[in-house]
Every structure is written in C-alpha cells, then in structure tokens.
Amino acid sequence: MSTHGLEPIDSKFVPRFAQIATFMRAAFREKAEGLDIALYGVPLDWGSSNRDGARQGPAQMREMSRLIRQTHFVTKMQPFKECRIADMGDAAVNPLDLMGSYDSIQNFVAEIVDSGALPLGVGGDHSITLPILRAVAAKHGPLGLLQFDSHPDTHDELLGHRYNHATCFRRGIEEEVVDPKRYVMLGIRGTLYAPDDLDWAYERGVTIITIEDFFEMGVEKTIEKIHEVLGVEPCYLTFDIDGMDPKDAPGTGAPEPGGPSYRECQEVLRGLRGLNLYGADVNEVSPPLDPSGMTALVACNVMFEELCLLADCVKRRGNE
Ligand code: MN
C-alpha cells in the first residue's frame, strides 16, 4: 500500500532532536480524509480530581516519541509503511469549559471516524475517553471496551460532580456507548472509597481483572479472558497510564503501587491481535510530575503497540 507522501521522519537519517515534534515523527495533516489511522492529542485535564498536568501530556509525548522507531520488535510490522498515518494535531479544548470541550472532542473524533480512519488519541485525563467513545459508537454501535487502569472509573459522582475521570465509564454504560457485557477492566487495585466501589460494574456484567486476579492468572490466561469477553464485535482500547506500576510510570496524577510492570503490559498488548478494534488511546501522563520524561516515553511505547494493533485491523479489513 502506498503511504501517499505520509512517510514519517526517519531517525536513521534525521537526528531525533531536529525538526518539529509530531507523534512518532509522523506527517502532519489537518484533515482525516485519506488516512487509515489518525493520531491526535486531547490536552484537557479539567476532569482530573487530584494532581493535574495531563493537559501537557500530548506535547510531551510528541517530544519523547522521537525515540520510537518504525518497526515492531517482535512482529516486524511497519505500520507507517503498511497504512496511511498522520498526526492531526489536537482536538480544540477549552480549559475553562469541560462540557464544551467534551462536545468539541466528540466532533473532532467524529470527523476522523466518518472519514473511515481509526482514531488513536493521547490525553489528557481519562474523562476524554467518554466523548471519544460517543463518536466511535455513533458509527459502530455500543462498543466492547478494554481498560488498562488502576481505578474502575465507574463511580456515580466525585466531589458532587458526574463528569470526571472517575465516572466516565459509568456514563459510557448509561449512554449505551459501552456494552458492559463486553467490557474488561485490567489492573484494578488500590484503596477503595468503600467496600462496594466495584459493585455497580459487577452487577452490570463488567469483567474486572483485579490486580489479585491478574497475578494469579498470569499473562496468557489474561489474554485469553480478554479475547473471550470482547469477542469479534467492534471494540475500543483505552490505556490509563496509572494502570501500570508507578515504578515504571510515576508521572501521573493518582499513582497506585503494586501494579503490572511495563513488560507485563507489553506482553498483554502484544496478545491482543485479533480484536476488532475501532480506536485506542493512552492518557493521564502528567509532564509536571514526570521531569525525566520517562513516563511519557513508556506511554509512547504503549502507543506504538496500540498503533500496530490498529494497523493490523486496517490490514485485515482490507483483505476481507
Ligand atoms: Mn482511569
């Protein structure tokens, strides 16, 4: 497949520190037409309840993603050669208008989805995934969801408010953009507000692979379970960087010790080929809490795994 002049800058020939930063040095395009996969940022963190700074996540990830090379280590996949991929810049958000920003994010992603491209987003706090899901579900129906996270994000309210990064997937189920029967949370842990924090999700049939479950099941059984629950219907992958252990990803607003390592997350991600993905994101990287940039770099590697999964979906659909 021709990449139509969308070749990213090749760091073997152009120094990493040179030129303008885009995600993984991709070409920049303002419109989604003609793309297979659209990379974009959502610099919004007003849905964050604790330490903020995730609004600066897309900028730092563009900078740190200069280190991402273009070939997958195991599969040798080359997404930028096999698909038409560009950085579309950021969704227009307003840090003083949370609900208006959600509308704007939804419209931005709807344009991507309507053009036939798959959205791969970078947050932002985790609440940005709700308007993204609204846009993707408008085209593909209620979605299966895989959520890497330390927190369930299915609370009803936090601090008296219904729209934030602790409630986004409860709203998603209520709005029927997420199918709770095809929804897997992975890595849930940490102290709870109350013993029944997870009950609402359990009662709706959400599959919760807590950290206790994960370390008992191991990577392989976890992958099997994810495929079993998500099946072959359209689904979406969301990766909250606080799902990973803070040893590997400390630069985030609400870190929870005792999580899966980067390596373990990578193994799970690499086991997800075959899912019928219609989009993905990574979020909650907070540059002010990440002075070395390591959390952003780890998140960029998650993003590359997601990119390869989406590229694999593009290829499979092209062959149908
Ligand atoms: Mn989350």
Image (spheres, rainbow, N blue to C red):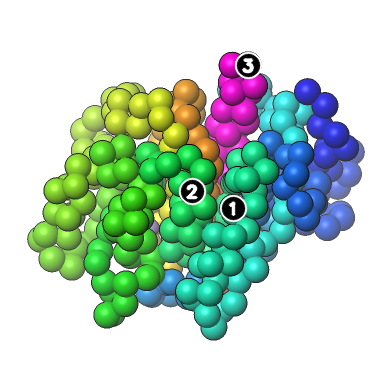
| Mark 2 or 3, nearer chain start | 2
Which image quarter is the N terminus in? top right
Residue 104 x %, y %: 58, 67
- Of 312 and 289, which appears nearest the observer? 312
Which residue is labeled 3 in the image? 319
Residue 165 x %, y %: 38, 65
Residue lying at the far top in this picture: please name it: 319
- Camera-side mark, 2 or 3: 2
Quarter-of-image position of residue 253: bottom left
| Mark 2 or 1, nearer chain start | 1
Q: Residue at x 48, y 48 (%)?
A: 138
CA gap between label 2 and label 3 equals 25 Å
Assess whether residue 304 is covered by the magenta stretch.
Answer: yes
Query: What amino acid does circle 3 point to?
Result: Asn
CA gap between label 2 and label 1 equals 8 Å
- Of 315 and 307, which appears nearest the observer? 315
Query: CB atoms at circles 2 and 1 under 8 Å apart?
Result: yes
Q: How many residues crowd around disc 1 within 10 Å: few (fewer than 14), some, or many (20 or more)?
A: many
- Camera-side mark, 3 or 1: 1
Query: What amino acid does circle 1 point to?
Result: Ala
Q: Residue at x 30, y 25 (%)?
A: 228
Which residue is labeled 2 in the image? 138
Which residue is labeled 1 in the image? 110
Q: How many residues crowd around disc 2 within 10 Å: few (fewer than 14), some, or many (20 or more)?
A: some
Task: Please report the bounds of the magenta region as a residue range.
Answer: 300-320
Residue 250 as seen in the image, left or right of residue 258: right
Q: Is mark 3 within 8 Å of ligand 1?
A: no
Secondary structure beneath dot 1 equals helix
CA gap between label 3 and label 1 equals 25 Å
Assess whether residue 71 is covered by the magenta stretch.
Answer: no
